[in-house]
Image (cartoon, rainbow, N blue to C red):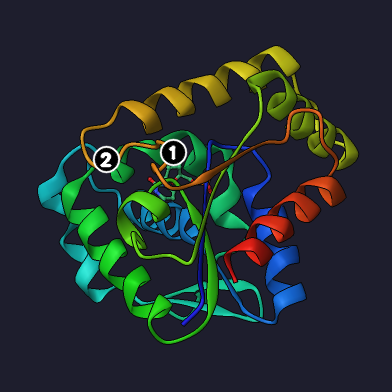
Amino acid sequence: MLKIAIDGPAGSGKSTISKIIATKLGIEYIDTGAMYRAITLKAIQLGIDIDDESQYHFLESTSLDICNGRFIMDGVDVSDEIRSVEVTNAVSTPSKMAKVREYLVEYQQKISNSKNCIMDGRDIGTTVLPDANVKIYLTASSDARARRRYDELKAKGEECDLQKIKEDIEQRDYQDMHRDISPLKQADDAVLVDSSDMGIDEVVEAIKTVINKAK
Ligand code: DC
């Protein structure tokens, strides 16, 4: 099986780039952030105390699926809902829990053993796919990441504040990098790509070069 791992902080362009590479190579794109977001959404919908790990027993009865690029939880398309500000601001809490991580990592490993894939997240190269054929750590300055997010929201006609976006990104970076279990960090054997001053095409080219070298 071909396994490509892409890790990096929020807004570094992992999902955009991974989707393009998946299409070019004809392999599956697996967005693991969407899984943590879906579990967060379900915790909010159930009204549990999201800080209380013992209340996450709903995991065993939760089904997750990816169908034509849409994210399905318990038979319902939640692709849009999992991107809400409420879920985004809460997702770091379930993401630091052992119970949630064990459940999702096992699921992610199972998928990677059934099809060729490019998987993006925070702990793919370090924990989920330590044996990946290619590992990339895709990053960018928080200024560049905030600016991209700001431009995206503006293009959708949404009101937003660049400084606030940057603060939220830096806060999520801090939480993702300082949790006890599988914190975000570059795997020793990952190739660093800093996209601060690169366009999408340049990043895709840089990553394709890394993949071709590994073949
Ligand atoms: O990639 P994203 O922004 O959609 O991810 C949302 C959150 O999920 C992120 O802030 C941390 C968590 N996450 C994680 O802990 N491990 C992963 N492999 C992927 C995401």
Q: Secondary structure at mark 2?
A: loop
Q: Residue at x 39, y 37 (%)?
A: 184
Percent position of residue 55, x then y: 15, 52
State the residue lying farthest toward the top. 163
Amino acid identity at mark 1: Gln
Q: Residue at x 45, y 52 (%)?
A: 37
- Disc 2: which residue: 96
* Left or right: residue 199 compared with residue 86: right
Q: Secondary structure at mark 1?
A: loop
* Mark 2 surroundings within 10 Å by alpha-carbon count, few (fewer than 14), some (14 through 19), many (20 or more): many
Q: Is residue 77 visible?
A: no
Mark 2 or 1 closer to N-term? 2
State the residue lying farthest toward the left. 54
Q: CA distance from mark 2 to mark 1?
A: 18 Å
- Disc 1: which residue: 186
Amino acid identity at mark 2: Lys
Towards the viewer: 72 or 44: 72
Percent position of residue 98, x then y: 17, 49
